[in-house]
Image (tube, rainbow, N blue to C red):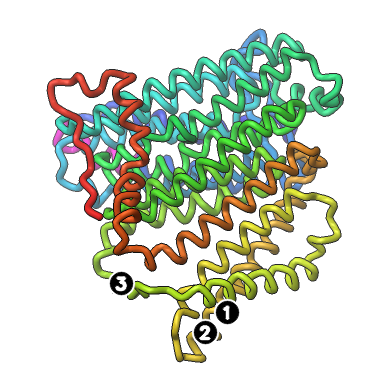
Amino acid sequence: MPSTLATLVLLAPAGLLLAALLPLGSPRRQPIWRLRISRLATLSALLLAILATALTAGVGAMTSPLLGLAGIGLSVRLDAISCSMFLLVAFVGVIVVQYSRNYLDGDPRQSEFMTGLCLTLAAVMLVVVAGNLSQLVLAWMATSLSLHRLLVFYRERQPARIAARKKFMVARLGDACLIGASVLLVGTFGSSDIATILARAQSLSPTTTPGLLQLAALLIGIAALLKSAQFPSHGWLPEVMDTPTPVSALLHAGIINAGGFLMIRFADVMLLSAPTLHFIALIGGFTALFGGVVMLTQTSVKGSLAWSTVAQMGFMTLQCGLGAFAIALLHLVTHSLYKAHAFLSSGSVVELQAIPRHHQPRVWPVVWSLLLALGMYGLLGWLFGVFARDEAAVLTLGAILVMGVSMLMAPTLQGTRSTSLVLRTLAAAGATTIIYFVLETAVTRLTATCLPAIPEAGPAGLLIMGLAIISFATVTLLQSLAPRWIHRPAWRAARVHLANGLYVNAWFNRWIGALRQREPLRQPTHVA
């Protein structure tokens, strides 16, 4: 009976499809009615997400009966992963639709925009609650196609069309990888049901895994990397800033996370291929570092947020590569909420008072901030039992957390004489560390029945973790001390190259022929 009730979750995307496709009479009144029905559909989806979460909490994970034949059709998989994502997408959908009410008020194409928005939300919801591979693959492709319409909403903007074309080509390659992985999974396990595939994957070990199954894991990893704008296919993401702000919020807060969701959903399959995990960890770690450094050189708010998303998706991919799938899920949800707020409030940033920066930061405050952050992590980690866990990945991610907390404290320690300001900063850093441990402990327990434990790291894994710690420490010091070199010619030249992403995107443009368009590609101009 509970599994039958799970089928009702399909009413959420069905309501959004109805809101998108329902004819609404006269063109003059159509935007008003389209907006009202869209708001009702998103609110209903949020209510269904809450009810589905409550049902799963009370009964446990379940898969609804298949509405189709021969493993092809619609079914719903409810567990901690899908319920978290369903709640996230539904909540962001409510906010974005409500925001669009005023953002596009008076635009003659507002009804068309709401149609594309509802179609995209419906496709994303079908992805996150998918109970079988056919639904997952088709909804995955529909998400990209419906998003493409939103990315080129302002058709007269040439940069938007070029960026959307690049995104389209990358997405089709990702689709091909996911289709290939699905065929291999069905051929290996004899079922398209996701729960069945994961259960049978748990019975295998990496040493007895068939070669085709390891290839399937690699294809899943590549599809996820392409979906989440990982290096070197990241170039389209910072360029889609000519889309309406609600689209940017939905893209950066929901759709871009689909790659991480895919790896988390098939965590049991991914663990069967250690080389695949190492590969995505290396790509994700490099993307996180690359995006973080480039982000610091951006002169626009949206550009900085876009490169921040590239870096955050890289860090989430690194977490998946280390086997910390529960922590990656936590990162996915928290980053989505933060980034949705950041984009929707980006227009108000000029009203905020800028925080003055020290042009000549001293080295010792940076060192002290690192030592204080390390002390906080050691004390609080001991209280939460982190060091009692035989999981090197947790300690690695904790070390990176230390560097982030030190960046929070370093500016305050640079020459301030206000004791109260220093104490407030230390309190904020401590609270941040405590919140991290509380959330990490909670999500690990909530997902214990649907996500595998972090695997034991081999020599290659330990080498990657050590490389990640050294690299993030280097970038942290660079970020803290870069203002000391602001007037040096070498640093000013390097800043220009970094601001343009080391021109990787320009090479991609030549490869796809974007520069042969009638209108030249508008390149951002950065002044050192």
Mark 1 Cα within 10 Å, few/some/many (few <14, many 20+)? many
Observer-nearest residue: 282 or 216?
A: 282
Name the image quarter holding residue 15. Answer: top left
Q: Are marks 1 and 2 in contact (CB under 8 Å)?
A: yes
Q: Quadrant of the N terminus?
A: top right
| Tag 3: amino acid | Ala
| Tag 1: amino acid | Leu
- Looking at the rendered structure, the secondary structure element under dot 3 is loop
Residue 354 image label: 3
Q: Position of residue 176 (x, y in %)?
A: 51, 15
Say left or right for 58 vs 420. right
**Could you tell me which residue is drawn at 35 percent across and 52 percent down?**
304
**Could you tell me which residue is drawn at 60 percent across and 37 percent down?**
282
Observer-nearest residue: 398 or 150?
A: 398
Q: Position of residue 393 (x, y in %)?
A: 73, 48
Disc 1 versus disc 3: distance between alpha carbons?
21 Å
Verify whether residue 35 appears in magenta.
Answer: yes
Name the image quarter holding residue 214. Answer: top right
- Looking at the rendered structure, the secondary structure element under dot 1 is helix
Disc 1 versus disc 2: distance between alpha carbons?
6 Å
Instruction: Tell me where the magenta segment starts and ends, as one range.
Output: 26-37
Q: Are marks 2 and 3 in contact (CB under 8 Å)?
A: no
Q: Which residue is mark 2?
A: 422
